[in-house]
Image (tube, rainbow, N blue to C red):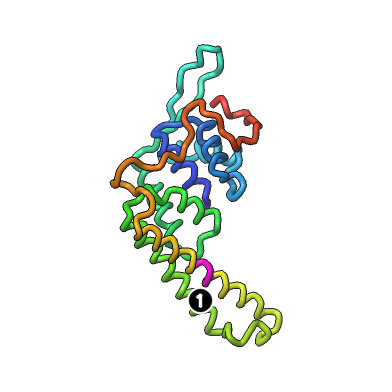
Amino acid sequence: MSAIRLLVLGAVRQHGRAHGYQVRNDLEYWGANEWSNAKPGSIYHALKQMAKEGLLVAHETEPSTAGGPPRTEYEPTAAGEEEFFALLRAALSRHDQKADVLSAGIGFLLDLPRAEAVALLRERVRGLEEWRATVTEYYTPEGGPGQLGHIGEIMNMWVHSADSGAEWTRGLIARIEDGAYVFAGEGEPFVGVLREGEANPYATGERHPGDAR
């Protein structure tokens, strides 16, 4: 699973309707260009590809009064909404997601009802615990990595990864259950996107040939 589809769908969805430069600006604002493959070319490609797949509908806008070219604004379709939530649930629940996919999932966590978010994260913990149990069939952490030579260091890394991932996820679950954040259906949501024309303090300052589109 690629993080870019979830990121782009989610960013468009938060605006309701957005053009490519808005999506790029939001993802840079979140730092996604540093921890994922959300680079300008990938963003514009994802928008066009998902429009072809029927997940987004493309609207051609009028040329600007300043004489600029028309640009394309994208809006999620019903299929796009369904795809967004499928990707989001997989990102949060699967124990073997890459860090960028999990990060994207956390970024849209509040789009879910609180109870569902907790249930998905508990599923992730269960997966990590089961994965750890599989590793420890061949490797005993108490015996130290030396028991399998340097290969034991690989097993040691896996066990530590499972333990730290489960600990972090349990902490997030506890904060959510204690009432942290505003989830879907609970009230005014956190605004994590930039308004039209709002300066991005983390922007790279570079423009892409597709920005006008």
State the SS at label 1: helix
Can I make out residue 57 in this image? no
Asked whether residue 36 is drawn in magenta, I would say: no
Residue at 38% x, 50% y is 181
Q: Decide which of 7, 26 is in the foreground and name it.
A: 26
Which residue is label 1 attached to?
A: 132
Q: Can you tell which quarter of the image residue 150 is in?
A: bottom right
Task: Inspect the image, locate mark 1, and give the three-letter code of the amino acid beneath it.
Answer: Arg
Q: Decide which of 119, 176 is in the foreground and name it.
A: 176
Q: Residue 28, how many percent across, how many down?
A: 57, 40
Is 172 located above or below residue 198 in the figure? below
Which segment did they paint magenta?
162-166
Outermost residue, right direction? 150
Residue at 65% x, 80% y is 152
Q: Decide which of 196, 57 is in the foreground and name it.
A: 196
Can I make out residue 66 in this image? yes
Is 111 located above or below residue 128 in the figure? above
- Dominant SS in magenta: helix
Q: Residue 71, how many percent across, how many down?
A: 51, 24
- In which quadrant of the rendered image does the C terminus lie? top right
Q: Residue 49, how many percent across, how many down?
A: 50, 39
Q: Is residue 161 left or right of residue 86?
A: right
Q: Is residue 139 left or right of residue 151?
A: left
Residue at 44% x, 41% y is 53
Q: Is residue 185 left or right of residue 67?
A: left
Residue at 61% x, 35% y is 203
